[in-house]
Amino acid sequence: LFVLHKSSEGSLLQRNVRVFWSAAVVTCALLATRWKLRSLNLSEGEDYRAEWDATNEVLARFLYQQILKLKGFWIKLGQQLSVNIMMEPAFRLEFGKLQDKIPPMSVSDVKLTLVEEFGAEVASTIC
């Protein structure tokens, strides 16, 4: 996904690189875990589950940190995923921090973003 919001935190290119880099890190970690379990001939059991749980905990923390840096849309996505019962518990727990531990965005920043994205006329009808 390309970043949907332009930010003073960095250029669109920098934000897109962060998104794709994060996706690559997660993909590599998942593939490495799968390869490790196959090489150990583990396909079920306590050790199998423990390995996946450990991988998920590390990846959940990593993605949480990336979401905090990306802000905006990504925080909203993380909030939605935190209540999805299909997500692994480690991700729901880590992303749950996005529900109530994120400082609110100032009204002036919201207004500025609306003006930048939609123009002053549309922004004035919203706020």
Image: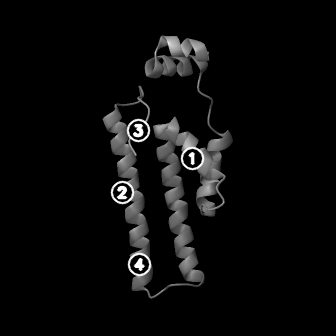
Which residue is labeled 3 in the image? 3
Taking the image as shown, residue 6 lies to the left or right of residue 13, namely right
Picture coordinates of residue 90, whole percent (x, y): 60, 61
* Residue at the image point whose x is 68% and y is 40% from the top: 100
Front residue of 48/27: it is 27
Instruction: Tell me the SS state at disc 2.
Output: helix
Residue 88 image point, x, y percent: 60, 63
To which residue does mark 1 refer?
78
The residue positioned 55% from the left and 45% from the top of the image is: 77
Would you call the spot at circle 4 few (<14 residues within 10 Å), some (14-19), or many (20 or more)? Answer: few
Q: Report x, y in % for residue 36.
A: 41, 78
What type is the residue that disc 1 sits on? Gly
**Disc 2: which residue:** 24
Label 3 crowding class (10 Å Cα cut-off): few <14, some 14-19, many 20+?
some
Q: Residues within 10 Å of mark 1 (few under 14, many from 20)?
A: many
First in residue order: circle 3 vs circle 2: 3
Label 3, secondary structure: give it: loop
Q: Amino acid at mark 4?
A: Lys
Q: Are marks 3 and 4 in contact (CB under 8 Å)?
A: no
Q: Which is more foreground, mark 3 or mark 4?
A: 3
Residue position for label 4: 36
23 is higher (above) or lower (below) than 51: above
